[in-house]
């Protein structure tokens, strides 16, 4: 009898595992293989080895727990009405993308950045030192049940004196990061470029927080975890996680894959990102 119970248990576990893996096998048909990199693209100058599923599993990466399961956004700056709308849309998106509660903290004033961490950039615009925001602002923050913390600023960022600018910077060990809206909105956010800026911001924030959950740059398929070196490359990259990266993320967070897809499709329809909507529809068709 004991042997029979054990056999039934193992069979049940095996069926459940195969069912879960079937999802990733099915949507893999929609993965678009990366072409050979050309000059001006990230992989042309960054010779990365990628990350297998086994390497991910064996790495030290964050797994949410009952005491560490909330993603936080900390706005820093003086935001316009349109920018505030984007921040709320980013919060909503991250909650769906990672299937974890995501909250926006109270806004900090730009006054928290001292003159020693500011400069006038090469384009005569004010810039903040990204490392200062990580080390002197975000590291001190311990909001309840924090699993990741991302600051958003409307000011341009620079990582060190010899660099012109950076879109964002993160400490994956500390699970903190900062991203700038400034260049994603082509300096000024308007109704005309709102959708393009939102798409860039969704890609940037989900990419950086994906790193915080242990995902390396994807070098196999068109994926939001691809490294990018410019706005045109970011614009041309997919907002979708490829099947391999989805499998890694799901192994730790253990969300319902179909539920996530349905919610992403509804979100993209609401914000009128039509290309992204079609990507979700194609994945849903594969698992029906």
Image: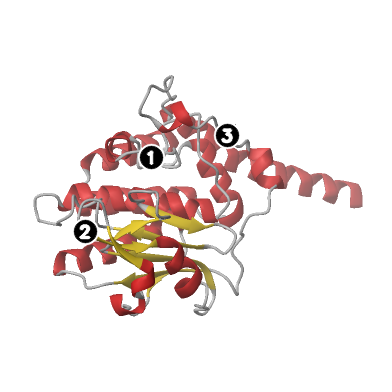
Pick whichever of labels 1 and 2 is earlier in the sequence: 2
Q: Which type of secondary structure does the marked residue at label 1 adopt?
A: helix
- Viewer-nearest of labels 1 and 3? 3
Q: Is residue 106 above or below residue 49?
A: below
Q: Secondary structure at mark 2?
A: loop
Residue identified by numbered label 2: 125
Residue density around tag 3, few if under 14, some if 14–19, many if 20 or more, within 10 Å: few
Q: Residue at x 54, y 49 (%)?
A: 249
Estimate the x, y position of residue 133 in percent, counting from the top left: 42, 68
Q: Which residue is mark 3?
A: 50
Residue 257 visible: yes
Q: Which residue is mark 1?
A: 284
Outermost residue, top side: 36
Q: Position of residue 62 (x, y in %)?
A: 61, 59
The picture quadrant where one finds residue 127 is: bottom left
Observer able to see residue 109: no
Query: Which quadrant of the figure contains the C terminus?
Result: top left
Residue 154 percent coordinates (x, y) = 26, 64
Say whether residue 190 is left or right of residue 7: left
Residue beneath the point at 43% across and 19% down: 36
* Marks 1/2: CA–CA distance: 44 Å
Mark closer to the chain start, 2 or 3:
3
Q: Is residue 12 left or right of residue 180?
A: right
């Amino acid at each position: 009898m004991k042997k029979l119970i054990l056999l039934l248990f193992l069979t049940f576990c095996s069926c459940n595992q195969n069912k879960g893996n079937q999802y990733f096998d099915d949507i893999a048909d929609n993965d678009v293989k990366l072409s050979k990199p050309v000059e001006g693209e990230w992989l042309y100058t960054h010779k990365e080895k990628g990350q297998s599923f086994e390497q991910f599993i064996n790495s030290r990466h964050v797994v949410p727990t009952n005491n560490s399961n909330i993603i936080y956004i900390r706005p820093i700056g003086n935001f316009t009405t349109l920018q505030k709308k984007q921040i709320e849309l980013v919060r909503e998106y991250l909650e769906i993308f990672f299937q974890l509660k995501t909250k926006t903290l109270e806004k900090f004033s730009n006054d928290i950045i001292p003159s020693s961490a500011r400069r006038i950039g090469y384009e005569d615009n004010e810039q903040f030192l990204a490392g200062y925001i990580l080390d002197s602002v975000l590291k001190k923050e311990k909001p309840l049940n924090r699993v990741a913390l991302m600051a958003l600023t409307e000011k341009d960022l620079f990582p060190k004196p010899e660099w012109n600018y950076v879109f964002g910077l993160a400490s994956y060990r500390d699970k903190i990061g900062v991203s700038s809206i400034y260049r994603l909105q082509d300096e000024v956010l308007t109704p005309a470029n709102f959708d393009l800026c939102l798409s860039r911001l969704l890609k940037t924030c989900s990419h950086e927080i994906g790193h915080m959950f242990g995902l390396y740059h994807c070098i196999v398929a068109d994926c939001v975890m691809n490294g990018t070196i410019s706005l045109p490359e970011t614009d041309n990259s997919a907002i979708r996680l490829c099947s391999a990266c989805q499998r890694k993320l799901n192994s730790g967070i253990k969300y319902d894959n179909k539920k996530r897809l349905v919610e992403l499709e509804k979100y993209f329809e609401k914000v009128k990102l039509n290309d992204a909507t079609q990507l979700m529809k194609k994945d849903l068709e594969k698992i029906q």
